Image: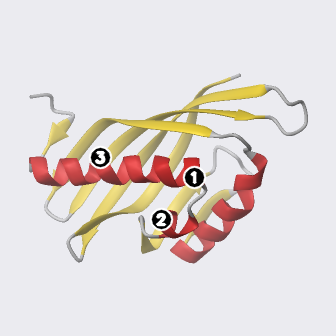
Amino acid sequence: MSGNYTGPLEDRIAIRELMESYADAVNRCDRDLMTSLWALDSHWDLSHYPQLGVVSGRDAIMELWASAMPAYPDLSFVAMPGMIRVDGDTAVARTYFSEVYTDPESGRDKRARACYNDRLVKQGGEWLFAERVFAILHQS
C-alpha cells in the first residue's frame, strides 16, 4: 500500500465521500449540503487570491461560497483524492480537482486544475473539513 493512504479503510472511504460530496454540492449549488461538510471553526485558505485571503468559520465560508457561485455558470467540478492519511479523529488529505465553467463575460469555457490540501476532523462520527488550502495547478 502507498504511504499516501494510511489509517482505517472505513475512515478513508468516509473522507473520500466527503470530498465527493463537496464536488456534488458545487455542481448543484447546494448550500445545505456544502454547509454540512465543514466544521464550525473551519478555515478556507484562498490566499492564492490575495483579495480573498483566509476565511474563518463555517458561516463566513458559506457566505463567501454562496456569493461566488453566480460567477461560475454551467460549472462542472470533478474531484479525486491524491492522499488521505488518518490519525485517530484527525486526518490530512490532498484533493485534486478539475473544473470547467462558462465565463460570464466572454461566454467561453474556462478550465482550471487545482488542489486542496486538507485538514479534517471527525466529530460526532462524521468527517468534516477543518481547513482547505487552495492552489491552482493550471488554468486556461
Q: Say which element carries label 3.
A: helix
Within the image, what quadrant is residue 122 found in? Answer: bottom left
Q: Which mark is residue 28?
A: 1
Q: Say which element carries label 1.
A: helix
Please state the total of marks drawn on the protein image. Answer: 3
Mark 3 belongs to which amino acid?
A: Arg
Residue at numbered disc 3: 16
Residue 86 located left or right of residue 23: left
Q: Are marks 3 and 2 in contact (CB under 8 Å)?
A: no
Q: Are marks 3 and 1 in contact (CB under 8 Å)?
A: no
What residue do we see at 15% from left, 56% from top? 87
Residue at numbered disc 2: 33
Depth order, front residue of 124/51: 124
Q: Measure the alpha-carbon separation of dots 3 and 1.
A: 18 Å
What residue do we see at 56% from left, 61% from top? 30
Q: Which mark is residue 123?
A: none
Q: Are marks 1 and 2 in contact (CB under 8 Å)?
A: yes
In x, y percent, where is residue 112? 62, 29
